[in-house]
Image: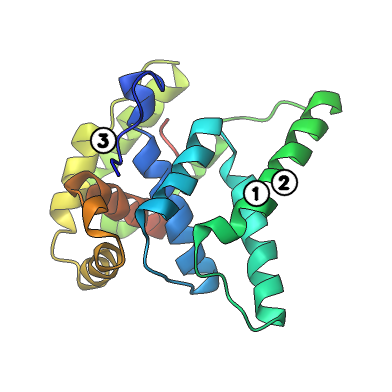
Amino acid sequence: MSVEAPAGAGTTAARGNDHDYIVRVIQYLDARHHIRFFITSKDFDVLYRWWEKGIPPAVIREAVDRVVERGRRRQRPPARFSAFAYEVRKGYQSFLSLGAGASRPEPQDPFAAANRFLAVLPPELEFVSADLASLFAAQRRGEAVDAAALEEKLLERFRDDGELNAKAGWFLKNLAPALRRPEIERRYRLNYLWGKFGIPPLD
């Protein structure tokens, strides 16, 4: 099984986000529910289809929470991502139905989170404070944001971080061999750092 998108499944830029989306779902299951299982190619296919359909991460998180809670009551924790498929599909249908008839919420400052983050920047990220400020400023101006240089600095600075290396090692060990690609590990490491420090999204 290839982890690349099928031919014609969108632009190259759009396809580049699939690994990020998939890794975040796996990380959520581990961080929120402490559930880890071997990720097969079939699991990856399930996650990839959710990304292809554009199912919002919040819908997936809620479905995961419901399935895990049911499994705990029955003492049968989920052991495959296919176990979440029905709940995700049902949640997504509900999301679409609500969206069709819902009134628009009052607009809020989309940059409030970035402003708060920069105001109390974690000390560990002082070395990229200028990079972050510049990227968030470009985001406010509506310009395309390229975080590649920032990402490389983060990866280099935390290359020898013991906790990150241990988690990345577990993650790769629990992936089917065909899925153990450098880009997958890179996305895992970056998502870990984004979550650990609460960096607001730059996309």
Q: Position of residue 161 (x, y in %)?
A: 19, 67
Question: Tag 3: residue type?
Answer: Asp
Q: Earlier in the sequence, mark 3 or mark 2?
A: 2
Q: Residues within 10 Å of mark 2 (few under 14, many from 20)?
A: some
Q: Position of residue 145 (x, y in %)?
A: 34, 24
What's the CA distance linking mark 3 and mark 2? 38 Å
Please say if 74 is above or below 81: below
Q: Is residue 131 left or right of residue 54?
A: left
Q: Residues within 10 Å of mark 1 (few under 14, many from 20)?
A: many
The residue that mark 2 highlights is 91
Q: Is residue 140 left or right of residue 172?
A: right
Q: Secondary structure at mark 1?
A: helix
Label 3–label 1 contact, CB within 8 A:
no
Q: Which color mode does the image show? A: rainbow
The answer to whether residue 198 of the structure is visible from this angle is no
Label 2–label 1 contact, CB within 8 A:
yes
- Pick the front one: 57 or 173: 173
Q: Where residue 131 is drawn, which disc sits there? A: 3
Q: Quick one: quadrant of the C terminus? A: top left
Q: Where residue 88 is drawn, which disc sits there? A: 1
Q: Is residue 137 left or right of residue 152?
A: right
Q: Position of residue 12 (x, y in %)?
A: 31, 21
Question: Tag 2: residue type?
Answer: Gly
Q: Secondary structure at mark 2?
A: helix
